[in-house]
Image (tube, rainbow, N blue to C red):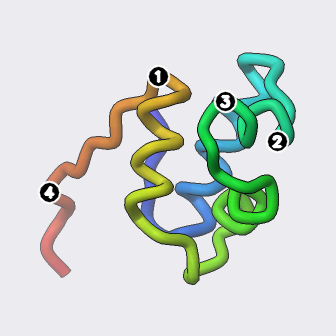
Amino acid sequence: MTRIHDPLSLGQALRTARKARAITQEELALQTGISRTTIRAIETGKETAQIGLVLQLCRDLGLTLTINEGEER
């Protein structure tokens, strides 16, 4: 399980999943209707990425995004 704690770790998890499926950013863009530029921004952790698009990428890559309660600080 990958711990998602910021936009970069989420982007890295999406990139890892995409590469594990041998899909290029361009192919994913064509499949999802999300521009390659936006996919690149999401994968590199740009905080301007829209959460709806991130969730769509998760669905299209067969991923489930889970939020677990962490330890109290």
Determine whether 27 is above or below 46 in the image: above
Identified by mark 3, the residue type is Gln
**Left or right of 31, for residue 2:** left
Mark 3–mark 2 distance (CA, rounded to whole Å): 10 Å
Mark 4–mark 3 distance (CA, rounded to whole Å): 33 Å
Q: Secondary structure at mark 3?
A: helix
Nearer mark to the viewer, of 4 and 3: 3
Instruction: Identify the residue under disc 3.
Output: 31
Mark 1–mark 3 distance (CA, rounded to whole Å): 13 Å
Q: Are marks 1 and 3 in contact (CB under 8 Å)?
A: no
CA neighbours of label 2 inside 10 A, class few (<14), some (14 to 19), many (20+): many
In the rendered view of the protein, which quadrant contains the N terminus? top left
Total numbered circles: 4
Q: Are marks 1 and 2 in contact (CB under 8 Å)?
A: no
Instruction: Identify the residue under disc 1.
Output: 62
Q: Quadrant of residue 7?
A: bottom right
Q: Nearer the viewer, residue 21 or 16?
A: 21
4 or 3: tag closer to the N-terminus:
3
Where in the figure is residue 44, as x and y percent of width and height? 74, 65
**Left or right of 38, for residue 13:** left
Residue drawn at 58 percent across, 59 percent down: 9
Identified by mark 2, the residue type is Gln
Mark 1–mark 2 distance (CA, rounded to whole Å): 16 Å
4 or 2: tag closer to the N-terminus:
2
**Left or right of 32, for residue 19:** right
1 or 3: tag closer to the N-terminus:
3
Q: Are marks 1 and 4 in contact (CB under 8 Å)?
A: no
Disc sitting over residue 25 in the figure: 2
Disc sitting over residue 69 in the figure: 4
Determine whether 51 is above or below 39 in the image: below
